[in-house]
Image (tube, grey):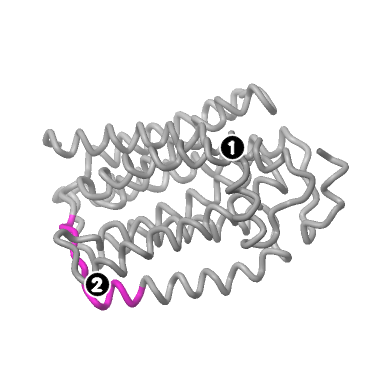
Amino acid sequence: MGPLELGGLAAGLLGAVLFGVGAVAQAHGVRRHPTPPVHLGAFVARSVRDPWTWLVLSAYLGGFVLHAAAIWLLPLYLAQATVAMALPVAALAQRHVEEPLGRAHWGSVGLVVLGLVLLAAGSGSAGAARAEPALALSLVAGAALLGLASALRHHVGAAGLGTLAGLGYAGSAVAVRGVELPLGAWAVVCALAVPAFSLVAFWLYSLGMDRASVSSATAPMNVGQTFVPAAVGVALLGDTVRPGWWWVVLLGLVLSTWGAVRLGRAADLARPHRPTGAGSAELAPSR
């Protein structure tokens, strides 16, 4: 890896630290309120008046800027895999508010780190940012589909909400690669898709953490936001792998994602579940 790639990797890992701390702060902020954030409009209206939410958004904004730099400098499969480090960071921070880390947790953290090492070793060059009509229109269609899928939020648990949030963050990552300078019409569409995906993903992620532990919502989110951009980056956006290192990259992607999911399950088993119903007032007594 050259200096630019190493800088991108460092930016991605530092962004993951901010995402992880922000996730735990977000969970705490969501659970401070007597009712869950079932409706997007009410969630936004409540959030703009909540100083704690602004602190969370500040952490996420800093993480996003660093993550965007990683997306531009690294292949998407590596840039997105660095986000998996947010879950170990969240687990470390979470031990102070929920459950301590056990042996299974630390084994999962080791899998995530090993997967990232393999990905970094086998990564090639990143595709150039390019704003194309097909990409921009696909992002618009994806954002619309995610909005429709959010209607299912009453019927899915934390894992399902985390999965939908992961798809939203995946769309945001792909959209960043479409922001080409100088900005043209299609680049503006891609740029607008970033906050559109991120807002819905942030809302669904918040709702998921209201119903269960931080890790149980974060683990499936990491799967979606890692594998989808990885496939799109290699297939459509020009990301490459070192010759002969495909199996190393694939193994690293599987290990880092498996570690994230395994960590989420281990943390979830250690913490009592919240009700996974429609987000009614039944949640209030548990706070």
Circle 1: is it few (<14), some (14-19), or many (20+) Cα within 10 Å? Answer: few
Residue 189 against residue 121 in the figure, above or below: below
Q: Position of residue 184 (x, y in %)?
A: 19, 69
Give the amino acid at mark 2: Trp
Residue 45 against residue 79 in the figure, above or below: below
Chain-order first, disc 1 or disc 2: 1
Disc 1, SS: helix
Near-viewer residue (64 or 94): 64
Residue 19 against residue 207 in the figure, above or below: above
Figure quadrant of the C terminus: top right
Near-viewer residue (284 or 249): 284
Q: Position of residue 125 (x, y in %)?
A: 15, 49
Q: Position of residue 267 (x, y in %)?
A: 65, 35
Question: Do the numbered discs 1 and 2 sit on residues whose CB atoms are within 8 Å?
Answer: no
For label 1, the residue is 51
Q: Decide whether residue 136 is among the magenta residues.
A: yes
Is 3 left, or right, of 151 in this rendering? left
Give me the C-alpha separation between circle 1 and circle 2. Answer: 35 Å
Residue 225 against residue 141 in the figure, above or below: above
- Kindly identify the residue that appears in the image at 64 percent across and 36 percent down: 266
Circle 2: is it few (<14), some (14-19), or many (20+) Cα within 10 Å? Answer: many
- Kindly identify the residue that appears in the image at 22 percent across and 43 percent down: 122
- Kindly identify the residue that appears in the image at 46 percent across and 56 percent down: 198
Q: Quadrant of residue 129?
A: bottom left
For label 2, the residue is 186
Q: Position of residue 160 (x, y in %)?
A: 62, 59
Dot label at residue 89: none
The stretch in magenta equals 127-138
Near-viewer residue (265 or 33): 33
